């Protein structure tokens, strides 16, 4: 549902689709709001802004001088200015619509804008505390799951020892009881409200929730299916991460049972198919374990998403990393439902990986070399992608906010 309002001073395009209200002023500024009226995305002055559910805002822009896409989180005063301006534009839109003859679309848009105008900076800022009461921070999702509804059946990572990874260092691993999961789902539903209409799927978090023993996991999935709108036209299936050694604790029949409860795809942090590099990264399991895990998941009827860390291990590992990673992917039973993400490795310089690199006197790759490695990898995977229909995509971890 969409319509355009044109006046002597302004052209306003209003879209009411995919669970969002989007206002576009003259094609120069866009503002999107969820079903509760909370701002979710803005685009103005050539900068894209994504508002996280805890009211942080990530901005992204193309910078010719620095080269490529840049990004950063806004400071508090910048967030406040942006969100105040966003609400002001919503008020401008409401004024324009008030001058129009009432139609069904205009009536829905006016009601939605009333919800938007019920928000203010203090109320939006208070969302951080509401979010923290329901969720542990959500540091990562695969790109095709950025619009998923996260359900944290576990907290943390059961391994939590890869040298480059800091995602879950703030929390011990724990599996929720069925009662705790029920309370979490209720909290998520209350927090999301009509914002749930913006969500496309369910992501079962945290790092490797599918590690949960089958006799506990099946009732959890059944509860999720019973309490949330999972199905065509609603939340389109359940997705999760799993590590290769954890996947080997399940059989293809176990994965088939998860599929029968709407699990669709498992994402495996492959990182590299080169075993010496995997050991250097303290990554659990070997390339052969990844191959066995993927075969088992596929035999159970689930799709897989593999994440490759481009450029990790620097100059010392670059050729062997590429060679063994491509060779591994080529021998996996992948098809058109599967994904490979090429994720250029970034570090803040403070991880154990950085110390290990220094100790081994390995130079990390610079931005240009990283781009080159990604292109090399993409090119090397072209034949297998063509043969199987497998999709190979770029994945920038820094682009994510939940
Ligand atoms: S298994 Fe995944 S989440 Fe856990 S420490 Fe390693 S990279 Fe991080």
Image: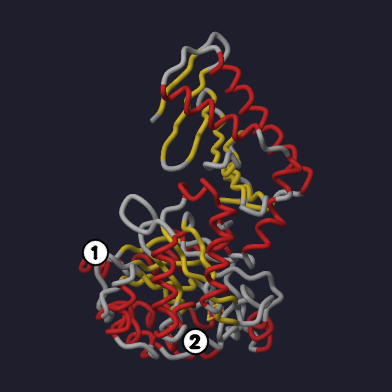
Residue farthest toward the right in the current orientation of the protein? 77
Q: Is 309 or 313 nearer to us in this picture?
A: 309
Residue 326 drawn at (x, y percent): 35, 77
Disc 2: which residue: 278
Q: Is 287 or 192 nearer to us in this picture?
A: 192
Res 54 → quadrant: bottom right
Q: Is residue 213 above or below residue 373?
A: below
Q: Is mark 1 within 8 Å of ligand 1?
A: no
User: Which quarter of the rendered image does ligand 1 occupy?
Assistant: bottom right
Report the side of 337 relative to 55 (left or right). left
Residue 126 drawn at (x, y percent): 73, 50
Q: Is residue 110 above or below residue 326?
A: above
Residue 236 drawn at (x, y percent): 36, 57
Report the side of 257 relative to 198 (left or right). left
Residue 386 drawn at (x, y percent): 23, 64
Res 210 → quadrant: bottom left
Q: Residue at x 25, y 81 (%)?
A: 299
- Colour scheme in the image? secondary structure
Q: Residue at x 46, y 76 (%)?
A: 269
- If you read the primary sequence from the N terminus, does the residue marked by circle 1 or circle 2 appear first? 2
Q: Residue at x 48, y 17 (%)?
A: 5
Disc 1: which residue: 389
Q: In this rendering, does residue 128 appear at all?
A: yes
Report the side of 219 relative to 344 (left or right). left
Report the side of 211 relative to 60 (left or right). left
């Amino acid at each position: 549902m969409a319509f355009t309002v044109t006046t002597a001073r302004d052209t306003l395009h209003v879209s009411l689709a995919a669970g969002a209200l989007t206002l576009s002023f003259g094609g120069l500024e866009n503002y999107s709001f969820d079903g509760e009226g909370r701002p979710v995305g803005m685009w103005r002055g050539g900068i894209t802004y994504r508002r996280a559910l805890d009211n942080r805002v990530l901005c992204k822009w193309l910078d010719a001088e620095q080269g490529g896409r840049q990004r950063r989180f806004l400071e508090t005063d910048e967030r406040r200015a942006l969100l105040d301006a966003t609400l002001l534009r919503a008020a401008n839109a409401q004024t324009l619509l008030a001058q129009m003859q009432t139609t069904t679309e205009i009536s829905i848009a006016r009601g939605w804008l009333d919800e938007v105008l019920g928000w203010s900076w203090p109320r939006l800022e208070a969302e951080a505390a509401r979010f923290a009461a329901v969720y542990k921070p959500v540091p990562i999702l695969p790109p095709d799951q950025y619009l998923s509804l996260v359900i944290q059946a576990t907290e943390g990572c059961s391994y939590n020892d890869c040298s480059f990874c800091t995602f879950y260092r703030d929390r011990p691993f724990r599996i929720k009881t069925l009662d705790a999961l029920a309370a979490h789902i209720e909290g998520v539903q209350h927090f999301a409200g009509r914002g749930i209409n913006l969500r496309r799927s369910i992501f079962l978090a945290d790092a490797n929730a599918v590690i949960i023993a089958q006799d506990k996991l099946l009732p959890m999935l059944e509860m999720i299916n019973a309490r949330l709108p999972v199905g065509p036209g609603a939340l389109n299936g359940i997705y999760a991460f799993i590590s290769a050694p954890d996947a080997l604790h399940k059989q293809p029949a176990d994965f088939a049972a998860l599929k029968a409860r709407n699990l669709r795809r498992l994402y495996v942090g492959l990182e590299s198919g080169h075993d010496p590099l995997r050991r250097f990264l303290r990554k659990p399991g070997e390339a052969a374990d990844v191959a066995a895990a993927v075969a088992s998941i596929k035999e159970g009827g689930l799709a897989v998403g593999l994440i490759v860390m481009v450029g990790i291990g620097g100059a010392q590992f670059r050729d062997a990393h590429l060679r063994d990673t491509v060779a591994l992917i080529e021998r996996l039973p992948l098809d058109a439902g599967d994904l490979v993400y090429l994720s250029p490795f970034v570090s803040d310089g403070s991880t154990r990986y950085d110390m290990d690199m220094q100790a081994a006197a390995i130079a990390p790759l610079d931005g240009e070399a990283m781009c080159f490695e990604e292109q090399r990898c993409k090119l090397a995977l072209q034949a297998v992608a063509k043969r199987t229909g497998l999709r190979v995509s770029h994945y920038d971890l820094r682009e994510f906010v939940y």
